[in-house]
Image (cartoon, rainbow, N blue to C red):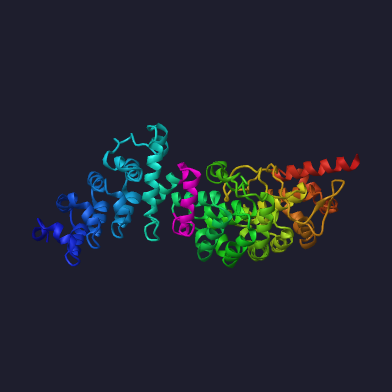
Amino acid sequence: MMSLITGHIYEFALKHDTARIVQCCLKFGTPPHHTTIFTELKDHVVQLSKSKYAKFAVKAMMRLGTPEQRHQLISGLYGNVHRLARHKEAADVLETAYNDYANSSERANLVQEFYGRKFALFKSKEGEEKGLGEILGGGEVGERETVLEHMREALAKLLDKSVVRHSIVHRALLDFLTHCDHTSRSDMIDQLKELLVEMLHTRDGSRVTLLCLWHGTPKVRKAIVKSFKPYVRKICVEENGHVVMMGVFDTVDDTVLVRKHILSEMALGLGELCESPVGRRVVLYLLSPRNRRHFSSQFLRNVLEPGDGNKHTKKPREVRHRELLEGVAEPLLSLARERASDWARSKPHSPLLLQIAASLPGAVAHIGAPLVELLAADFDPSDHFVVHPCGHWVVKRLLTSEEIGGGGEGGNGEEGGEGEEGGGEERENEDEKRGGSGEKETGGDEIEKTRSFAEMILEGVSEDNIRAWTNTNRGAFIVCSLLSSKVNGVREKTKTILEPALKTIRTGTLEGQKALWKDINSNNNKTNH
């Protein structure tokens, strides 16, 4: 086959029937065959990229060629990037080259062609490439305006639904919106407002969308939010797109609009979102924005906090958060009650369950009932909920939230991801205020309440079961949390339940038993005083 096409490969690649022969030789050929095809086609990369059929041969050479061959193919695109980006077929090749195969130096050289004609003709040496910020900062007088004006004109021609999806265009738009003046930014945002849904699937595209939300007027934000509606659930589970949803929650003051077009769609697929690692991040952010227990400081500082203080967001964050939360409270409580038993035993889901308890009034009543059923089951020291690595931690956290008697966003919590582990053997430092059980502090140490999780446990679990917990390490720590409760009557009732087991606890060697005995003595001393 190769002996028949050698010398005519370029002509074969351009025709719809013979192009498949070239592709077949690339797919099944040996490296020497690849080199033969590459040698004949390397000087025709631009023409081949524009062909409906030959573009597949170019993409195959990038995929199967050596690093040096790949570099020559990408270099063959230099000087034509802007024109190729507007071409229906060639844009696909350019996207493949930029997104899948180009190294950092080649990417920089490709993007620089949007900065002006001289950047298309004269390329920087490898390792000496400059970003737009460096070029504008170190250029001659007047060069800044020239470069930005060229970018504005070039990008305006690319704002077509089929072209704007490509990541190289997203990079150029991000550079432009970051460095242009207010008037140019407003004009560009106005042109982009209904195209952003095509862009937010890439990292740069999601940052462009955030900039449009931050600097867009309320009218522009309304158009952006409306354009998201058919794709809300898909956006929420995308690696890059989900960040845009957080930006909407942070930025858009019209909470009625957000509830109608965003939260209503989320509510329809809430279970699916909570099962997705990325979707859970969106739900957690809706429950407790800027909470460093769920989102790292670096993420918040670099991605979301730059939008704080924009001139079009005027409603206090606490008010906006409360109004948005009302839009998903009912379906989220219903889902939490339905899946509490499973989530409490799942390391990825347990932080979400606890955050629901902390953020939604009355959530403990919904979550507590199925958990008490698990706690009330016949005690098996090897397979009971109180000895489960994650389950016992959830119970302790819920009890501790009542002990602290606090609630709210929990924005000062320690840094960590949503899958943080909490099932250790030692007693954790309970330094974060968590509430949500409908309790309010009164003048003393006791808590006025409707129905607390601690009371639900004492009413729903047999005394024999509670005493049996003290024979296990994790179970003993749960009893410690009951004994430390400030809910009226819980402490006294727990002490009464433990009286028949005091000797066993006192002589126990487990860390949990030692901590429990210490708490019992501490409570006795307080009572004597």
Q: How many marks?
A: 0
Pinpoint residue 478: horizontal percent, then vertical percent: 72, 51
Is 187 one of the magenta-colored residues? yes
- Let me know if residue 281 appears in the view: no
**Rendered image quadrant of residue 425:** top right
Report the quarter where the N terminus lies: bottom left
**Residue closer to the observer: 49 or 133:** 133
Q: Which residues are magenta?
A: 177-201
Q: Position of residue 167 (x, y in %)?
A: 39, 52
Say if residue 359 shows up in the picture: yes
Main secondary structure of the magenta stretch: helix
**502 sits to left or right of 433:** right
Residue 35 horizontal side relative to residue 344, left or right:
left
Image quadrant occupied by the C terminus: top right
User: Is 516 located above or below residue 192 in the figure?
Assistant: above
Q: Nearer the viewer, residue 504 or 267?
A: 267
Q: Of 257 and 528, which appears nearest the observer?
A: 257
**Height in image: 83 above or below 16?**
above
